[in-house]
Image (tube, rainbow, N blue to C red):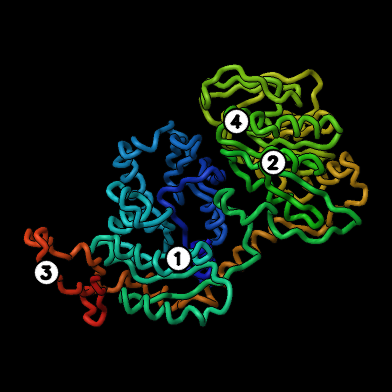
Amino acid sequence: MLTAGICRWLRRRGVDVAPFKAQNMSNNSAIAVDGGEIGRAQALQAYACGLEPSVKFNPVLLKPGSDRTSQVVVLGQATGHIGARNYHEIKDRLRGTVLETLRELRARHEVVICEGAGSPAEINLRAGDLANMGLARAADLPVIVVGDIDRGGVFAALYGTLALLDADDQALISGFVINKFRGDSGLLQPGLDSLTELTGRPTFGVIPWSTELWLDGEDSLAYDGRVLGRPAPPRGGQWLRVAVVRLPRVSNATDAEALAAEPGVQVRLTVEPADLADVDLVVLPGSKSTVDDLRWLRERGLADALLAHAAAGRPVLGICGGFQMLAERIFDDVESRRGAVQGLGLLPVEVTFAARKTLGLVTGTGLGSQPVRGYEIHHGVVSREAEGLTPLIRLADGTGEGAVAGNVFGTHWHGAFETDGFRRAFLTEAARLAGRHGFEVAPDTSFAALRERTVDVLGDLVEEHLDTEALWRLIEGGAPAGQPTVVPALRTAAPAPPAAALGEPAEVPEPPIVSGASDVVLEAR
């Protein structure tokens, strides 16, 4: 989000800027204009730059299918699956792709803002790092370390991050930013002063917490609670209550954000069967592992609760993997390799997983000839459907997509509900089926305007709360020369002489000094 804010700030200054994330791990993805798949966060950052998303903005995307394996997407195309322990075996090949892609972007744009991944101080992974200090060292990039104060321990995290890096890595760390602060930032000043004294580096600013920033989360963990978004009061006399099942391997949970953008629609993410008992609409979102998440639904009791909801005539919506779960049968020799699996049986279709992933930007009409746009990212395809089944969407050539069977809806298209008219038509029908006759859609809700507002808020936060002149100096000149190196005490302490084992006092080492900043001393205790 901070990267997107810096991108929007630079674009406002007339700078030709592009985003870059060498390696992302997320199941929330988007389709780029050049046909491949990238992290959703990089699509938002591209939007902040005024650019169409490109596979070059995120050359390596890892999509976890389990706790131990991920699908590897390189320059937008799936190249296979790999485990966490043997990922290092392909990193050398990926490093060349990453550096060449960054070189191309730097040649094409005035500025490239690179987002890291996780922490640069994951010292167990430093040797093969592609996204943090490995990238910064290879491309000689100035680095800002961002600390999330909402998680606590921010000063220890910032200082400790620097102290765990070797001297060459530390030379590129140019300063800090504290993010998500709530309260009076003046109370932080003594800590900021001490951090500068201890590290020889400035804090470029403190970004306050903003309740307006909930759109386009990088993954489902980005949602700060069970209620999605900031529900606006209904235009009519009733709310429409929506439950989105938070699958263990949920993919593109951002589809639910478009529903939450509508006034009078309360969207909750849940893993509890009881939460499905009194809602109006149940949504099964996408999944990176359809068959495994379907089994989890059954084990958790959510499948029975969803079937009871549908049997009562109330609406159910399945998107991508969720659509596949609603089928009568699933044939999967690709993702889970479990062969034939019984689906929930709410839609009269069968789904077969293909080795080649379907990727693309798509357009059509649905729900009363409403125009709709979206994108596809899936291995499963409908291989059989009941004769006369009504599609949810029709393409220009008359081909049907998705399915409608009474109160049950399914589609493979992500992003379809970002189309305002299509979303309103669906919610109106969902409210009718749920008996919420007092619910009314708002005629003026614009999802595109909400996204524009999000990146503008990010740009405002950067302009108002960061030292943008200092940021500009980093962009123009790189990391400052001669920055001090923080040396932890134990790293410099001499081993105790053998006599210490006999009870004689060991020699106490001199307190280590931060190189290049003689007024900064770490006490050895």
| Mark linked to residue 290 | 4
For residue 424, above or below residue 17: above
| Quadrant showing the C terminus | bottom left
What's the residue type where badge 2 is placed? Glu
Q: Which residue is at the front of the view, 41 or 399?
A: 41
Task: Identify residue for label 2.
Answer: 272
Q: Of helix, strand and loop, which one carries label 4?
A: helix
C-alpha distance separating marks 4 and 3: 62 Å
Q: Position of residue 46 (x, y in %)?
A: 53, 56
Image quadrant in which you'd find residue 451: bottom right
Disc nearest the viewer among 4 and 1 = 1
How many other residues sit within 10 Å of disc 3, few (<14), some (14-19) or many (≥20)? few
Q: Residues within 10 Å of mark 1 (few under 14, many from 20)?
A: few
- For the residues labelled 1 and 2, the Cα–Cα distance comes to 32 Å
Q: Is residue 397 above or below residue 265?
A: above
Q: Position of residue 7 (x, y in %)?
A: 50, 64
Query: Mark 3 or mark 1, which is nearer to you?
Result: 3
